[in-house]
Image: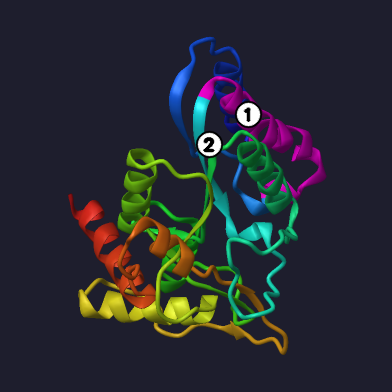
Amino acid sequence: KRKIKEIRRQNTKTVANLEQEYDLTIHLAANSGVDYCQNPENRQEVLESNVGLTRRVCDISDKVILLSTDYVFSGKPEDGEYKESDPVNPHNFYGETKARAEKIVSENNGVVVRIESMFGVDNRTAVYLKEAINGNAPFPFRTNTYFRPSYFTDFLEVIKKLTSENHQGIFHLSCSGKALNKAEMAEEMLKAYREFSIPIKKDKFEIERFDKDLRFVLNTDRTREILNLPEFMDSKKAMRNHVLWEWKEKES
């Protein structure tokens, strides 16, 4: 943990000392571990990396594209899905810092891309699901939090459009199709493991059910209309593709 903290400090310091100016910066850096950010002992560090670093990136860039999160919302959308124009109401401290970063970028005429948990690359949610399938998950899967994952190829198409065309404001990126809770995601990944004949140690999971739901579901209609993009990948297909990608990575 000390080593990780030192790496984070070094990376922040490196950007803080940059004197060169840039036409465009795609800003993906952040402390994104929700539990880590929520710990009061880490809050100053998280503020420096998520807010202070964003301010510095804007200082040295003519234009910034910031990767943000669905956690800038509370999880209780009025219409079932959050639109780009909806007011933020952060769900946790991580979401609060990203909301502040969004404000900085917006005030500097930049672009904010809000995503949900991104599949097709290393992903914390997928790691946890995989651990469960291998019989190592310490906690049950909850049914109370719904979202649609984002997929990496869709992300690349959005970034391509935003870097080649002149856009400002907020954009949403998530899969199409059904919003899933963690228990449903585990079942979809399990189906994919069976389809590709990947060895598994566990085929049933403990499920914790709740009466009230949180929905971190991003509406992408406006984003796709402005950027002239087709429907994003279906959420279940994205999870299937992620399993196949992970398996190929492991085999190679």
User: Is residue 2 visible to us here?
Assistant: no
Residue drawn at x 22%, y 79% is 195
Q: Nearer the viewer, residue 167 or 210?
A: 167
In the displayed orientation, state which residue is furthest to the bottom: 211
Whether residue 1 sits left or right of residue 221 in the image: it is right
Q: Nearer the viewer, residue 81 or 198?
A: 81
Q: Position of residue 117 (x, y in %)?
A: 49, 60
Q: Nearer the viewer, residue 135 or 181?
A: 181
User: Could you tell me the amino acid type at mark 2?
Assistant: Ala
Tell me the tag on residue 3.
none
Q: CA distance from mark 1 to mark 2?
A: 8 Å
Examine the structure image and report whether residue 42 is included in the region drawn in magenta. Answer: yes
- Dot placed on the residue nearer the N-terminal end, 1 or 2: 2
Callout 1–callout 2 Cβ contact below 8 Å: yes
Alpha-carbon neighbours of circle 2 within 10 Å: few (<14), some, or many (≥20)? Answer: some
Q: Quadrant of residue 14?
A: top right
Q: Position of residue 241 (x, y in %)?
A: 27, 67
Whether residue 129 sits left or right of residue 234 in the image: it is right
Residue range (magenta): 36-61
User: Is residue 221 visible to us here?
Assistant: yes
Tell me the tag on residue 53.
1
In the displayed orientation, state which residue is furthest to the top: 19
- Which residue corresponds to mark 2? 29
User: Could you tell me the amino acid type at mark 1?
Assistant: Leu
Q: Quadrant of residue 23?
A: top left
Examine the structure image and report whether residue 51 is included in the region drawn in magenta. Answer: yes
Residue drawn at x 24%, y 65% is 244
Element type at mark 1 = helix
Q: Position of residue 204 (x, y in %)?
A: 45, 85
Alpha-carbon neighbours of circle 1 within 10 Å: few (<14), some, or many (≥20)? Answer: many
Residue drawn at x 72%, y 85% is 212
